[in-house]
Image (cartoon, rainbow, N blue to C red):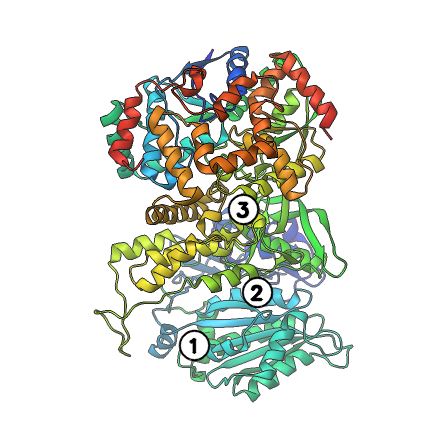
Amino acid sequence: MAKITYYPGNVARAGASEVEDMIQPLCRALNIQLVELPRSSSDGGNIIKQATPKLQDALVARNLALAENKGLDVLTTCASSHAIMCNTAQDMARDPVYASQINNLVVRTSNIEYTGESKSWHLLHYLVEEIGLEKIRNAVKNPLKMNVAAYYGPDMQREGACGNDDPFMPTYMEQLFEALGGHAVDYDSKCQSVGSTSVLSLEDTSLSMTAAVLSDAIDSGAELVVSACTISHVNLDSYQSKAGRVSGKNTIVPVCHLSEIVAFALGFYPDRFAQLRTRVRLIGS
Amino acid sequence: MAVVAKVWIDEDCITCDACQDICPEVFEVTDDSSMILAAVRTDGLFDRNEGGSLLTGTLGAELGDIILEAAEACPVEVIKFELVGDGAAVTEVAAEAPAEIAPAAVAAVAPAAGASDELNAVFAGDRTINILFGSQTGNAAGLAEKTAKMAGNYGLEAKVVDMDGLDPASLASMKRVMIITSTWGEGEMPDNAESAWNAINANGPGLGSTHFSICAIGDSSYDEFCKAGHDWNGKLAALGGKEAHPLQECDVDFDAPWQLWVNEALPLLACVDSSGTLQVELLEEMKAYGSGDDDDAVEGDFTPGKIVREELTITLELFRYCPEAAESGWDTLTCSVPGHATVQDLLISMQQDVDGSLAFRRGSGAGTPTTGIRVNGRVALSDSTMIADLTSDGGRVRVEPLPGHPVVRDLIVDTSRYENHRSRAEPWMRTDPREGERLPSGAALGTMEPALATALHLAGDVQSFQLIQAMSDTLAHDSHYEGPGVHFQQWLRAKDPRTGQEQRRSIMNSLLQRDGVWSEADHASLMRFGEDGRLAAHSLNEARMQLLNQTKYAGKHGRLVKWYGRSVKWTGKVNETTLYRQVLGPLGLVGNVFSGVSARMALAFTRNGSPPIRSLQSLLLPPAGLGRIPNMINSKVHDYHEVVSLFNEIDQRF
């Protein structure tokens, strides 16, 4: 059984609690043992970084050190959290002096330090590279049977944060959807930002960006959009109607989290999956 | 094992194909003679190699024995070669016995040790040569590139200049100019030279220190054969320019006359010293230097390394846009290209061999900042991005215009919005009068510590600010936003200690405005584009840090940062209720209620059956402490005092 620590990110145990519902059974079904990090904190969400980069890096290094303390890597479902962990790890590896400053702070406050041993995995890359599509394909109980568009976002689509996938023309989620019995829909905007970190402070721009992504997916034949980023899901789903009104574009399409769609296909929460299928049938293109 | 330095074909080849059969990697037999393939030669030409161009890379070693075998098999003994062995060169003729060992005669790019003092004096100054091209179908542009490659043989630093956008006033500062231009229609200028021609006629500069030579391409079946070239020749002479070598006319079969011209004109122009004087007495020595047969050349191979990669078969998808018909679409074709070819090489081939109307910006081949395109999702410079770095054999190369700018035609974008913003932002140096170093004119000169100068340089060491501008996903959605490329330059200027206080204040005020640094919705869209994107995002974050201090966290952005930090400090987690309430305020929350955002969030309308009460509580109710919110939402993380300690150690403002 694969063993890895779990970092829920900033919203999976708050506004996006459906992610939390899914991740545990999903991992059990694929023989992945999740180890809790009850001392882990928010990673600063690239917001605290705007005031004090060092504080955000210290928070992240502390979380990584907690995983390292258990001799394990970290798994997260949020592209933004995964990218933040990769950034801090890379910045510390690039600059040993900076790394030692951060570690001094972490040691002083928490009595642990991050040496760079543990690394972050996004659920997507872990499933494709560590578990394998064949194993997932064999575990499918409810094939998706719908046209699914992947939303990657920009956070993890760069060298060093997206495994062996192409940062600019990724295909991992599409491969995964096919393995789950769905039909993957390709579209240009799948790595474009929807401005999720700025939706509160820069709403109009953020909604326009959200509408551009959703309408592109719909125009390409998507019946469902699956987000690899938990925080971007807020824009894609909760702000969907408003984005449509602001931009004048068609943005109405069901959106769900990556962990949800995998769990559904593996046979969990069939009632919720039925509800999703109904929504897809009613409003999907 | 024989190591061959160069190989060439003498006259009287009987085209028997023997050499090609033995060594097809090097020889190709045409109707007239056996030729040395361009791919194996440092000069990239395809002919008999009478000029004695060296073999590229390690080919001489890898194919040495086979070349010798081909030479031995030649029935008329016209295959000649030069061997290199044990650090020395051995000159052989065909398969005869080795001759006496002579000193190595290898190409030297630095002034030769044995050159006369006069020649070294010429090499000491500015060695720029500007090669201007006026091209309708790409032929003249291609010749300009080839000419530029050969200019290095004479110690010249070639700059290939597209006449499109050429400021004629800049000609006055050019000491050496070569013009290669075609003639279009009935004696007209090619499209890309039209505006430069009109401008120089309206207001031509004095060209007293400019030496030039012109290669005119045309079609002798037209009455106005090579008229454009003659027009330029007459105009430059009329403005005081000195014709270093007479104009060369080229008919449709232009390779041979162009070669003739370039062999004569280049060494002549190379004899123009940095003061603009033609040292014609050095011509013979310069020719000898350029041909590489200087016995006194310094030893060692100074030829720049050339990366040769396997040929790839790719599917090219090329964006096309025709403004007259207002139609856009994709051209798709399968082709084979050397892996080391750049995207620009590919586009030039397309233009020359497939569709002469393809429009794109060309660069000098060394990362020209204005050659930005999007290729396979990346923003990149077309003249420095290799195909092999984008795809593998059988892969796809998708070329599009640079994002964030309106498209003019095909891959050409209109960068005027960026230029206008940049012009208004004034990111150039304006110092205050100060004590300290002074220029000879008496003007104040700002000084800087070397370590700071290095740090400042590294902070802004990017290929192209235009590319930085195109990295933003936000730019296309906010017509007021000035863009990261502009703000990056402004922030670098604000950090520069030589910048005057007034300019620094002006920059910071500008960055704070509605169209300033807070307009970028997501720095992640920059971060993904390698080191350049990382540098830009880092700098723009620095600017935000300073502005937050300056404004004491006022405004929506300030409140977002302040309350995000505070909520994490309270529990170790983010409290969304606090954020929404503090950043949006009561009116914003009510607005979300009426716009349906709250309903979608809280009532789980679009979720898949998760208990709605959780979301409702997490998003609308006041934060922690009421005792009715599920523990998973508002509980503190274990040992959360450690998180508080981190905040207290690093930043107590939260």
Label 3 belongs to which residue? B474
In this rendering, the answer to whether B321 lies above or below B114 is above
Q: Which circle's residue, 1 or 3, is located before the other in the chain?
A: 1
Location of residue A57 in the rendering, given as x and y in whole percent from the top left corner: 34, 34
On the image, which quarter does residue A84 sit in? top left
Is residue B80 visible in the rendered structure shown here? no
Which type of secondary structure does the marked residue at label 3 adopt?
loop
Side of A112 relative to B138 (left or right) = left
Inter-mark Cα distance, 1 to 3 = 58 Å
Q: How crowded is mark 2: few (under 14 residues within 10 Å), some or many (20 or more)?
A: some
Label 1 belongs to which residue? B285
On the image, which quarter does residue B161 sit in? bottom right
Q: How crowded is mark 1: few (under 14 residues within 10 Å), some or many (20 or more)?
A: some
Label 2 belongs to which residue? B146
- At x 31%, y 22%, the residue is B640
In this view of the protein, which residue sits in the foreground, B301 or B563?
Answer: B563
Which type of secondary structure does the marked residue at label 2 adopt?
helix
Q: Nearer the viewer, mark 3 or mark 2?
A: 3
Label 1 resides on the chain identified as B
Label 3 resides on the chain identified as B
- What's the residue type where badge 1 is placed? Glu
Q: How crowded is mark 3: few (under 14 residues within 10 Å), some or many (20 or more)?
A: many
